[in-house]
Image (spheres, rainbow, N blue to C red):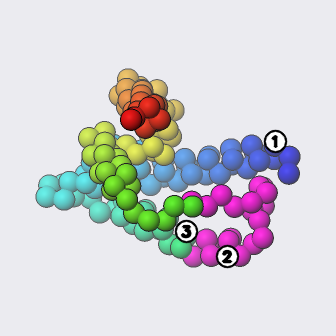
Amino acid sequence: MSNSLRLIAALVAGTLFGFGLAVAQMIDPAKVLNFLDLTGTWDPSLAFVMAGGLAVNALLTPFILKRGKPLLAEFFQLPKKVQIDKRIVFGGIIFGVGWGIAGYCPGPMITSLSFANSDILTVFAAFVVGTFGTRWFLAHRG
């Protein structure tokens, strides 16, 4: 499979994903924070967005995995680790706290870079520093 075809497919998939995030208003941190505010101005609409994504994934993944290999790769790259451990739990908690503070998770945050305002650039810079800082820490811990 040609590398340019894979890049075009990734561009189309990423554009479709970003467009879906924008249409669903998941790139609006106020909308996200209202979803997380269960005791105040709770807005449950993002639960429908997430449920829709989960439903599509749950329905299509078994059919996709029945194929011998992906359309644009040599093999499926599935996680080898399936048990829940401390890193998964604590990582999820840290992710959730960051999501709650900033109102962005990585997909919508990257989509929001098109706004190029100081708020999103600050959140993105913190994301990059946190990601690489954590990788460095985990690689160098005793």
Evaluate if marks 1 and 2 touch, with contact meaning CB atoms under 8 Å apart. Answer: no
Q: Is residue 29 above or below residue 70?
A: above
Q: Residues within 10 Å of mark 2 (few under 14, many from 20)?
A: few
Q: Is residue 38 magenta?
A: no
Evaluate if marks 3 and 2 touch, with contact meaning CB atoms under 8 Å apart. Answer: no
Residue type indicated by callout 1: Ser
Residue type indicated by callout 2: Phe
Q: Is residue 73 magenta?
A: yes
Q: Is residue 102 visible?
A: yes
Quadrant, the C terminus? top left
Q: Which disc is residue 57 wearing? A: 3
Q: Nearer the viewer, residue 80 or 110?
A: 80
**Residue 66 appears in which quarter of the rendering?**
bottom right
Q: Residue at x 57, y 76 (%)?
A: 59
Label 2 SS: helix
User: What x and y, as percent, mark residue 124?
Assistant: 43, 31
Q: Which disc is residue 63 wearing? A: 2
Q: Residue at x 55, y 70 (%)?
A: 56
